[in-house]
C-alpha cells in the first residue's frame, strides 16, 4: 500500500486544490500573507503524509510526519475560522471546509493510533 491508497491523503489533496483556488479569490493585499499561509498549510497535510509513507523506516518515523500533517490540519481549521470571522469566506464555504478538515483530522488521528 502507498500513501495514494489512503483516503486521508486523497481527501487532503483535493482540499489543497480547493484551498489553492479559494486563496486566489482573496483580495490582492492578502494574497502574499493569508493566501500564502493557507496554501502552505493545506499542501502540508498531503505532503507530510506522502513523505512519511515514502520512508521505509520505522512506524515512529511515519508517526512524526503524520503528527506534522495533523498540526497543519488544525492550522487550517483555525485559518478557516479566521476567514469566516473576517467575512473573507461565506458561512457555507466555512461549513463545507470545516467538515472536510474535521474528517481529515479524525482519519489522521486513527492512522497515527494504528501505527503506535
Image: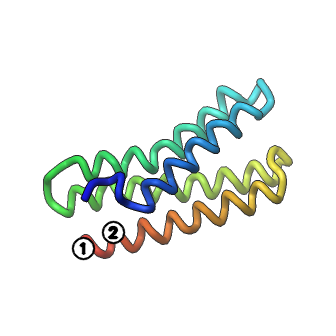
Choose top left, top right, bottom left or bottom right for residue 91: bottom right
Q: Is residue 16 above or below residue 70?
A: above
Q: Is residue 72 left or right of residue 38?
A: left
Which quadrant is home to the C terminus?
bottom left
The residue beneath circle 1 is 116
x, y percentage for residue 23? Answer: 69, 36
Q: CA distance from mark 1 to mark 2?
A: 6 Å
Which coloring applies here?
A: rainbow
Q: Is residue 20 above or below residue 79?
A: above
Q: Are marks 1 and 2 in contact (CB under 8 Å)?
A: yes
x, y percentage for residue 5? Answer: 35, 58
Q: In what element is the residue under mark 1?
A: loop
Total marks shown come to 2
Mark drawn on residue 112: 2
x, y percentage for residue 71? Answer: 47, 56
**Residue drawn at x 81%, y 59% as measured from the top left:** 92
Which quadrant is home to the N terminus?
bottom left
x, y percentage for residue 9? Answer: 43, 55
**Residue drawn at x 45%, y 60% as measured from the top left:** 8
**Residue drawn at x 66%, y 34% as measured from the top left:** 35
Amino acid at each position: 500500500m502507498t500513501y495514494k491508497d489512503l483516503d486521508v491523503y486523497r481527501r487532503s489533496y483535493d482540499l489543497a486544490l480547493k484551498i489553492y483556488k479559494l486563496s486566489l479569490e482573496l483580495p490582492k493585499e492578502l494574497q502574499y500573507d493569508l493566501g500564502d499561509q493557507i496554501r502552505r498549510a493545506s499542501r502540508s497535510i498531503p505532503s507530510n503524509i506522502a513523505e512519511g509513507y515514502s520512508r521505509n523506516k520505522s512506524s515512529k518515523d511515519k508517526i512524526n510526519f503524520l503528527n506534522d500533517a495533523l498540526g497543519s490540519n488544525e492550522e487550517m481549521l483555525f485559518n478557516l475560522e479566521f476567514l469566516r470571522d473576517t467575512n473573507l469566506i461565506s458561512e457555507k464555504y466555512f461549513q463545507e471546509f470545516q467538515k472536510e478538515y474535521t474528517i481529515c483530522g479524525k482519519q489522521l488521528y486513527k492512522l497515527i493510533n494504528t501505527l503506535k
